[in-house]
Structure formats: C-alpha cells, structure tokens
Image (tube, rainbow, N blue to C red):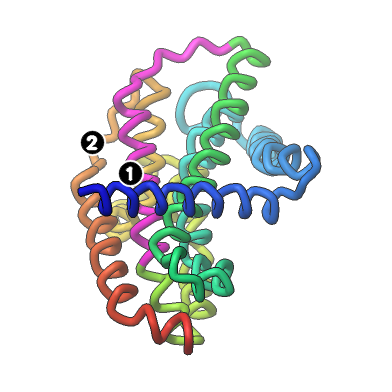
C-alpha cells in the first residue's frame, strides 16, 4: 500500500515538473508569451466579426457577432489544441522518456493539463471581456457549458492519444492527418449553425464530433437555442474509444516508440 502511494506521489511530481517545463518552453520566461496566447484568439474573433458584419446584418444566433464566434471558436480551439499537444507528447519529451521515472502517460497528462489551464484561462478572459465591453447579459446554462468543456477535453484527449501512437508508428500519418482535417474549422459550426445547412450537408457533418462540442457551448450561452441534433453520447463514445485504443497501443509498443 505504501509503495503504491509512493508511486502515485512520484508520478504526480513528475507530471507537475513536466507541466512547468512545458510552460517555460511554450510561452517563454517573459509575460509576452502569455500575452500572445490571449491576443491570438481575440484577434481571430475580431477579424471574423468585422468580416461577417460587413456582409450580414446579424449573426445566425443572437445579435452580437463577437459572442457568436467566441462561443464557437473557443471550445473548438480547446479540443483541437489538446489533440495537437497530446499527439506530439513523445516527440516533445522523448529525451526524458529514457529515464525510468518518466512515462508516456506522464507526458500525455502534463500536456492535457497545460492545454486545459491555458485555454480555460483565455476563454474566461475573452468571454468576460466581451460581456463587459458590449454590455451583454447572457442567461447562462452552466450545465451545458460544463458538458461542452467535458466533451472538448475528452475529444481532444481521444484524438491526441490515438494520433500519438499513429504519428510515431507511421511517419506519414501526421501529414495525412493534417490534410484530412484542414477543413475541420469550417466544418465544425464555428461560423454557422448546423440548422442553417442543407439536409445533405447535415447528414454528413453530424458525424463531426467537434460540431457537437461547439453546439453544446452555444446552448450554454443562448437560452433560446435548442440544438436538438446534439449527441454527447456519440462524442464521448468516439473520445473514449480513441483513448482506450490509443493507450493500449502506446503501452504495447512503448519501448519501440521510445528507442526506435
């Protein structure tokens, strides 16, 4: 029992050290790194808002363009950023994996924590700022917002863990995945509502789990939005399937991936 507790404590210390290391290498030692982490989504939302406001009188939902795009852009970015960071876990921390105290699982958890903390902080800052600047009074549905975040985290982890194996086992997979997912931003409902699409497009895009993550977040911010198409069960099924299969493959081929 004591050995198990000691092992867990050691693993937690390793994960904490990896998070601090990656914070330094990702954002640098100056506050400027964190400034740009916040400025990037703000700039993207501003550009989208200005561009669409020049063409349309109002967004597909509500009356405020920045809020509409923020509720799509931020949850999409959370899921996508987790998947990208987790995919590169072995590559980023490979020198450390030669030490017995550091495992692939430790590096994955550390990257999920870093991405989650960073993106949640950015989302809170952006959304609060939008409500203050535009004097918005959203009737929040906290359970829907929480569910959207849980879906985003699970989806990012599922895709990332499975891709972590595939990218390291098959050299070309990273390029193939980048090509296949290039239209993902446009196909995930960040710029539009699922209900405004033709039926043919709805039948295809429904299977994009990112679309459900974005839709659930908008349910949390727009009291009149129903989004009957949403299926959290589908998203969690895809996510946990990817997590289970990815962890199984990583555990079975860990030595080859690290030393190969």
- The CA span between labels 2 and 1 is 17 Å
| Residue under label 1 | 151
Query: Crowding at label 1, few (<14), some or many (≥20) Cα neighbours within 10 Å?
Result: many
* Residue 70 higher or lower than 99, as above or below: above
What's the residue at 69%, 56% (across, down)?
A: 25
- Residue 164 versus residue 159: which sits nearer the camera? 164
- Residue 135 versus residue 11: which sits nearer the camera? 11
SS of the residue under disc 1: helix
SS of the residue under disc 2: loop
Q: Position of residue 150 (x, y in %)?
A: 33, 40
What's the residue at 51%, 61% (across, down)?
A: 84
In the current view of this chain or complex, which residue is farthest to the bottom? 260
- Residue 4 versus residue 137: which sits nearer the camera? 4
Q: In which quarter of the image is residue 129?
A: top right
Quick check: 40 left or right of 146? right
* Magenta run includes residue 154: yes
* Magenta run includes residue 150: yes
Quick check: 40 left or right of 148? right
Q: Where is residue 104 in the image (x, y as percent from the top left)?
A: 42, 67
| In front: label 2 or label 1 | 1
Circle number at residue 42: none
Which residues are the magenta region? 136-161
Q: Position of residue 3 (x, y in %)?
A: 27, 53
Q: Mark 2 and mark 1 in contact? Answer it, CB < 8 Å.
A: no
Quick check: 50 left or right of 61? right
Circle number at residue 228: 2
What's the residue at 37%, 25% (across, down)?
A: 220
Query: Crowding at label 2, few (<14), some or many (≥20) Cα neighbours within 10 Å?
Result: few
Mark 2 or mark 1: whose residue is earlier in sequence: 1
- Residue 254 versus residue 57: which sits nearer the camera? 254
């Amino acid at each position: 029992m004591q050995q198990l507790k000691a092992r867990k404590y050691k693993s937690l210390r390793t994960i904490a050290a990896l998070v601090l290391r990656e914070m330094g290498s990702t954002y640098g030692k100056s506050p400027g790194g964190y400034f740009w982490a916040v400025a990037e989504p703000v700039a993207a939302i501003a550009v989208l808002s200005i561009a669409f406001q020049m063409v349309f009188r109002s967004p597909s939902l509500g009356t405020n363009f920045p809020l509409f795009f923020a509720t799509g852009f931020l949850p999409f970015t959370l899921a996508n950023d987790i998947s990208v960071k987790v995919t590169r876990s072995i590559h980023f921390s490979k020198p450390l994996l030669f030490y017995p105290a550091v495992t692939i699982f430790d590096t994955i958890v550390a990257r999920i924590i870093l991405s989650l903390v960073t993106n949640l902080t950015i989302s809170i800052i952006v959304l609060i700022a939008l409500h203050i600047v535009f004097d918005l009074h959203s009737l929040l549905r906290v359970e829907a917002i929480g569910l959207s975040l849980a879906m985003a985290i699970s989806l990012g982890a599922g895709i990332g863990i499975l891709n972590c194996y595939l990218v390291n086992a098959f050299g070309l997979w990273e390029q193939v995945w980048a090509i296949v997912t290039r239209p993902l931003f446009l196909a995930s409902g960040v710029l539009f509502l699922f209900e405004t699409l033709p039926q043919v497009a709805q039948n295809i895009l429904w299977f994009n789990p990112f679309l459900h993550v974005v839709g659930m977040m908008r349910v949390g911010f727009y009291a009149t939005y129903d989004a009957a198409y949403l299926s959290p069960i589908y998203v969690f099924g895809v996510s946990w399937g990817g997590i289970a299969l990815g962890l199984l493959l990583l555990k079975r081929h860990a030595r080859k991936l690290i030393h190969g």
